Image (cartoon, rainbow, N blue to C red):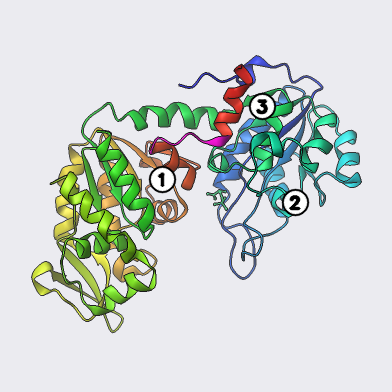
Amino acid sequence: MINLITMDDFDFENKTVLIRVDFNSPLDSETKIITDDTRIRRHAKTIKELMDKGGKVVIIAHQGRPGSHDFSTLQQHSKVLGKILGKPVSYVSDIFGEAAKSEIKKLKRGEALVIENIRMFLGEMKKLTADEHAKSELVKNLVPLADVYVNDGFAVSHRAHASIVGFPVVLHSVVGRVLERELKVLDKVKRGEEKPCIYVIGGAKADDAESISDYVIGHGTADYVLTGGVIGQLFLFAQGVDIGDINVRFLEKKKFTQYIPKIKELFKKYDGKILLPEDFGIDVNGKRKDITLNDLPTSYSMFDIGLKTAKKYTELLKTAKIIVLSGPMGVYEREEFILGTKRVFEAVANSDAFSVVGGGNTLEAVKKLGLSDKISYISTGGGALMEFLTGKILPGVKALEKQHL
Ligand code: 3PG
């Protein structure tokens, strides 16, 4: 595990603590109410520890991206946090102006304040170096009020944003409990020392799927990659299987066919290590019909893997010591097409392997199937998880490491 200064190494009594968390949560598209508070719950433990240790806790977080449907203030996040903690948490709709500064100065030991969505500060997401971010208005205005910075936001530590990399340049900084645990657990998974290690890659993130497969098989971390969802179709198509115009058009519309040359290379390099679906659930006028490879091409949309594929994957998953699950096997949102995801996810949940799950859709499917308690480790990260597992150094972690120099 990377050697970082932890929360055990600092006396928080009566100190003003800036803590960066990742409260970014799914919001109902109409009511804009938080539909899943998992991340807030996870960070609440770190925040409580800081409050119990006498800290005056200033919480920095984001919700959505500017312009996106889920870009919002953090008022409701502060209320949800207050409920979880069983204590009121204050909120100020300001980041580093006079209103925010005055609320921060008013904090008493053991109290917490959520400042406004950090992405409302235009400099937050600018492509700058850590030293440049350290000179931002955000850092310049908040550092004089603070004694220490805690980065607890694993899920956002793959972003070199001002609130992630700027503070550690100029303020004593430590790793928070959530980030510390993620690094500890995922470091073992990343090394893939226990064999077999199997990655299950479904969903529809084509660029990620190609690069993850290349990294984990190429580095000997994973023994097999099992594909499903749109990724399964894309990989099949790259292997020369005619999946039917309607499905090809979908891949083209999403610009996924650009990855085909690279995927072909993967098959050449890693013969037999990448497994493809052999049967499918197709959507015939709103009803599921199951077909096999022999029935292709089809003039209907492929929305799931079939039972034969799920059985083959299940047998292999029974032998695994480590499983990383990323992406559903089909359109799990529709009852007719949840079957493949259900069978494969149940196989992961019931296996003796150490299983790791992360990412919005995958987590939602795991929850929908009632399997959350049977997964060994649920990461708070989506993009950050995959970047970490594919050997990238997360800028947020790098910024904390520099504290040692
Ligand atoms: C996430 O939800 O993965 C993190 O909060 C990062 O969000 P971003 O992809 O908008 O930077």
Residue at x 87% of width, y 46% of height = 97
Provide residue 2's location: percent of width, then percent of height. Answer: 49, 22
| Location of mark 2 (residue) | 121
Disc 1: CA contacts within 10 A as few (<14), some (14-19) or many (>=20):
some
For the residue with label 3, is its CB less than 8 Å from the closest atom of ligand 1? Answer: no
- Does residue 394 show up magenta in the picture? yes
Which quadrant is home to the N terminus?
Answer: top left
- Give the CA separation, mark 1 to mark 3: 25 Å
Type of amino acid at the residue the image marks with label 3: Glu
Dot 2 or dot 1: first in sequence order is 2
Horizontally, is 397 left or right of 349 in the view? right
Q: CA distance from mark 2 to mark 3?
A: 28 Å
Labels 1 & 3 near each other (Cβ < 8 A): no
Magenta stretch, residue numbers = 390-395
Give the class, few, some or many, for how many residues have Cα within 10 Å of label 3's Cα (few <14, many ≥20). some
The residue under label 1 is 372
In the displayed structure, 72 sits above or below 133; it is below
Kindly check if marks 2 and 3 are in contact, taking CB atoms under 8 A apart as contact.
no
Along the line of sight, the residue nearer the viewer: 92 or 98? 98
Q: Helix or strand or loop: what does disc 1 sit on?
A: helix
Please give the label number shown on residue 132.
none
Q: Which mark is residue 49?
A: 3
The reply to whether residue 86 is visible in this rendering is no
The earlier-in-sequence mark between 1 and 3 is 3
What type of secondary structure mainly makes up the magenta span? loop
- Name the front one of labels 2 and 3: 2
| Gap in angstroms between the C-alphas marked 2 and 1 | 35 Å
Q: Residue at coordinates 78% horizontally, 19% vertically from top-left?
A: 13
Mark 2: C-beta under 8 Å from nearest atom of ligand 1: no
Picture coordinates of residue 38 (x, y %)? 55, 46
Residue 193 position by quadrant: top left
